[in-house]
Amino acid sequence: MVSRWHFLTAWAAAIAASFITTASSVAQAAEPPNILLVIADDMGLDVSPCYDLGTEKPDMPVLESMCRDGLVFDNVWADPTCSPTRATLLTGRYGFRTGVLSQLGGRNATGGIRTDEVSIQRLLDGAPTAYAHAVVGKWHLSDTTNGGDDNPEIMGVGFYSGLIAGAVSDYYRFTLTTDGASKEVDGYATTVFTDIAIDWLAEQEQPWFLWLAYNAPHTPFHVPPAGLHDRELVDDPAAIAADPLPYYLAALEALDHEMGRLLDTLDPDARANTVVIFIGDNGTPGQVVQQPYSRRTAKGTLYPGGIAVPMVVAGAGVTRKGEREVALVNTTDIFATIADLAGLGRETAEDGVSFKPLLSGGEAAERSFLYAEYETAEAPMTGNNGWTIRDERYQLLMLDDGIHALFDVAADPGGTVTLLDGGSTDAQATAARLQELGEVLRSSR
């Protein structure tokens, strides 16, 4: 009996090493995938390859190859600005739960991320197979109330190096913070972050999760280094101010080049076992936004142009190659999906739903609505304070200044015509249904 017990124990251990049973009883391969999350700062659908909105597109061959070899998501919502979205990615929770409802810094700060939140990195520490994890690039979740430069480590990040603040004043000279220590560096930010990420990856001997948050193409608009783009650009402040769009697109092209350089450094086995999630953190800035959006419906607003973002997933486990997915996805869902990919199951995020099954044609838990909220004290953006909710077709906008609107985003992706103006019975009933759904959610604060 003893030998039989040891045999069964060894057999069970072998099975456990080969398969991780998720909460949904779906078996995963023994070697969990590496996970690369790439965040583009201020990139909306109107400038994104693989989406039909907008007319001027950057040349991004690496991202376009991901679209051909992976899955493009058509209905993804972030929050209107950087910090709130990053908080949802980090915790899988809406802003009214974390308290991060607007951009950190200046008069409009609502406080950094609370240090008692369960970050995705803290969650991964309990994965069946130990994950190494790092954040490289823009953080934008800390202030003097939650540890400042040490905040990433306080939140459980294994290695951090990047930009603690929300932006740089100069892409070629900026303050780099590495595990709490800051110094001025000379170098192009997109390249510096890529180099740091490459060096960290070269040291890894276990499955890893890398959060690579570029600050490109966020302002200031500028001329990236030669070799990272092919545009003829004049490095002149007046020329940039007069026509910033080509410079904004060039920054995206530089990002794409460097993302490709990083992927090329992975050995074939690591590359084959890496799933890449590419996402924008909010809509395009008003200075460079394109139709069907406008300055008043771009970044910093709860209109579609401020919160509808691109997302493409490719690599390990993605069998739906070159396909599109219409399922509703919120940025809180990325937390749940990363946890699911790491073998932690699907019941991990309070406000997130894992979309991992969709990557291979399976059925994911149904998400019936998307939600976003914004609360700032900074004029004139206070006019966008409020909340919004949508189902598969309609978006209800509820602003604090009394503006209420209902858009058919399936037919009117720019949110240019509110159906409430006509006062039809169907529109009123749809608005009432969505409002009730939103208020039930908000009552769970």
Image (tube, rainbow, N blue to C red):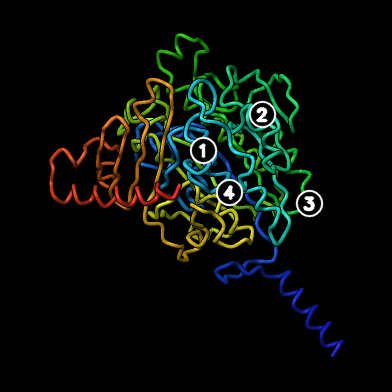
Q: Earlier in the sequence, mark 1 or mark 4?
A: 1
Question: Element type at marker 4?
Answer: strand
Where disc 3 sits, the SS reads loop
**For this view, does 21 lie left or right of residue 363?**
right
State the CA–CA distance, disc 1 to disc 3. 37 Å
Image quadrant in which you'd find residue 373: top left
Q: Nearer the viewer, residue 195 or 210?
A: 210
Residue type at mark 1 is Gly
Q: Which residue is mark 4?
A: 276
- Per the rendering, the mark at residue 99 is 1
Q: Amino acid at mark 2?
A: Gly
Q: Are marks 2 and 3 in contact (CB under 8 Å)?
A: no
- Kindly report the distance in space between the C-alpha atoms of the residues bearing marks 4 and 3: 19 Å
Task: Categorize mark 3 by other alpha carbons within 10 Å: few (<14), some (14-19), many (20+).
Answer: few
- Quote the CA–CA distance across marks 2 and 1: 17 Å
| Residue at 34% across, 48% down | 439
User: Residue visible at 54% across and 38% down?
Assistant: 86
Secondary structure at badge 2 equals helix
Q: Left of 103 or right of it: where is 162? A: right
Q: Which mark is residue 205?
A: 3
